[in-house]
Amino acid sequence: MGAKEHQHGRRRGVLDLEAQFAFFRSQHRHPVNAAAHALLTGPILFTNLLILHFLPLPLPSQLDDPALALALAYAAAYLAVDRRAGALAGLLFLAAWAASRALAERLGFVRSWKLVLATQLFCWTWQFLGHGLFEKKGPTVSDLPEVFLMEPFLIFLQILNKLFGYEPYPGFCKNVDRKIEADLKERRELEQRKAT
């Protein structure tokens, strides 16, 4: 199932939506950090798509556009974890791919690269500051592949939940809250054991 070791001994599958959402929410508890991620993850992804239009990668001839390959991979992953929200997120990814392609053709490589560099530096700086200054922690290196794949969808899911009360299935948010509480309890117990 592609599980990785969680920081506190639990295993979290890449497509285990409850565990991924609980981990995401536990890493983004401070409002400033949560807002930074909600606002800046989209521009990071969009500029990733933008620069991929200029990179020649060895892909099958049917899929010779690396940006389209990335958009389709994200869309497929999101459909796998939740059909309704995943379908909407997949459509947004394909719209971003089309917009990035049009922008790449309009700007050309040099201006696109400058835009990508400035956007990535700004957005990543604020993401790291959000974790360092406000959360005092961030994902570990072993969490990064899952974070890169799942975080955009988890942000989207959180927005759908806050604005429309959307849940992938009844009881999803309660299950996530229980997982977060269990994780916080485990952290407190570990800290108490270290202190004694």
Image (tube, helix red, strand yellow):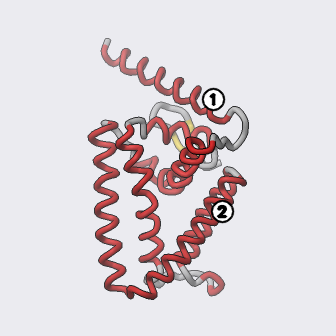
Q: Is residue 12 left or right of residue 134?
A: right
Image coordinates of residue 34 in percent, x first then y, are 41, 44
Q: Is residue 118 left or right of residue 180?
A: left
Residue 174, numbered label: 1
> Badge 1: how crowded within 10 Å, few (<14), some, or many (20+)?
few
Q: Where 146 falls versus 172 (above or below)? A: below
Q: Image check: 61 left or right of 96? A: right
**Residue at image coords 36%, 43%:** 33
Residue 19, position in %: x, y? 58, 38
92 vs 47, nearest the viewer? 92
User: Which residue matches tag 2?
Assistant: 76
Q: Secondary structure at mark 2?
A: helix
Front position among marks 2 and 1 = 1
User: Residue 96 location, x and y as percent?
Assistant: 53, 70
Q: Could you say which quadrant of the image residue 75 lies in?
A: bottom right
Q: Residue furthest top?
A: 196
- Rendered-image quadrant of the C terminus: top left
- Determine the residue positioned at 62% across, 81% down: 63
The residue at 52%/29% (across/down) is 180
Residue in the image at 37% along x and 50% along y: 36
Q: Quadrant of residue 108?
A: bottom left
| Cα distance between the residues tagged 2 and 1 | 26 Å
Q: Dot 2, crowdedness within 10 Å: few (<14), some or many (≥20)?
A: some
Tell me the amino acid under the disc marked 1. Lys
* Residue 83: percent from left, percent from top: 72, 54
| Circle 1: element type | helix
Q: Nearer the viewer, residue 196 or 137?
A: 137
User: Residue type at mark 2?
Assistant: Ala
